[in-house]
Image (cartoon, grey):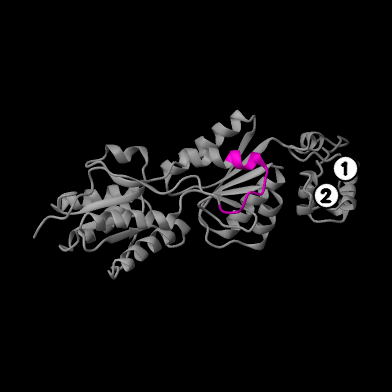
Amino acid sequence: MTEGAARPTRQPSMADVARTAGVSAQTVSRALRGSPNVDPETKRRVLAAVRQLGYQFNNAARALSSGRSHTIGLVLLRTGGYYSRSAVTAGVEAAADEARYAVTIATIAALDTGLMERSLSKLADQGVDGIVIAVPLISVTQKMEDITRNIPTVTLDGSRTAGARVLGIDQREAGRVATQHLLDLGHRQVWHVSGPDEWIEARQRRQGWQECLAAAGIQAPPPLEGDWSPDSGYRQGQIIAMIPEVTAVFAASDEMAFGVIRALHERGRSVPGDVSIVSVDDIALAAHCSPPLTTVRQDFYRYGAAAVALLLRGDDAGVEESVAAASLSVRGSTAPPRLP
């Protein structure tokens, strides 16, 4: 910069507004979004500070004039379940576009409450009108509770907060339906390749499997934990292939089931001749593997679209809501056990 030249003026930040108004940055965010939880005097101070500093809060000017930002936030996990993540995103974006809303996507790299807090705070700071959470955290923090209480939020079989509504199938029921199908075919025991323990869906599907076996008077064998990937299914399939008495397997996801099937084939065990396999998700590839996979259906695209519809409906129609009951797509990977 040459001597005597004017220094560029720094744009005021939300922190500047918060200091001027004597409130927290989170309160500034809520005030600019028109949250009903901000008292009129606090909002007056925030707006006065905005005018005084000339602050522009992303969509704040438009949101203040219209009362809405016409933006929906979507929180996704960067890893695991590529097909389901893509389908959810497509459903959210299609429904939002039809309603003339934009979608802002925030991804987190791991199942971590700190990362989740930052993603939700980022969306709150951008003034989104609603949030769809497609991340399966089991535990939530007070900050997450506060944000989802102030911004309409729907979760897709994911993080439970007091203020969020939930869409999706009953994951425990999915585990029971899958396991009962194998028992009804005549299998006397069902092994389980589970998802990672920190995922709420994995815990619930495992619980459904255990409950179904217990109801039939069968003690569940130890679950074999995977990470949703075909590679992890393949690794656990190698173990299963070395246990000759195994005739039936419930895999917690289609992608892990693909890996199990490959491992069994490589070890000379046929599906479903020697081992029947059932899973959960019913992604597009499930009907095209060899053999075609029997699986509990989840319509991820529909869930994404339904989440947007529920947000835009704007009522408080109960915390727990389900799009559909667990339904089984029966294909060629399951059959009665061979007679001894």
Start-end of magenta stretch: 308-320
Quadrant location of the C terminus in the rendered image: bottom left
| Camera sees residue 227 | no
Quadrant location of the N terminus in the rendered image: top right
Residues at marks 1 and 2 touching, judged by CB atoms closer than 8 Å: yes
Residue ID at (42%, 58%): 172
Q: Position of residue 269 (x, y in %)?
A: 15, 53
In the depicted structure, whether residue 170 falls above or below residue 86? below
> Relative to 235, is 252 on the left or the right?
right
Asked whether 14 falls inside the magenta stretch, the response is: no
Helix, strand or loop at disc 1? helix
Residue ID at (63%, 33%): 102
> Relative to 84, is 39 on the left or the right?
right
Q: Position of residue 311 (x, y in %)?
A: 63, 42
Question: Which residue has dot 2 on it?
Answer: 16
Helix, strand or loop at disc 2? helix
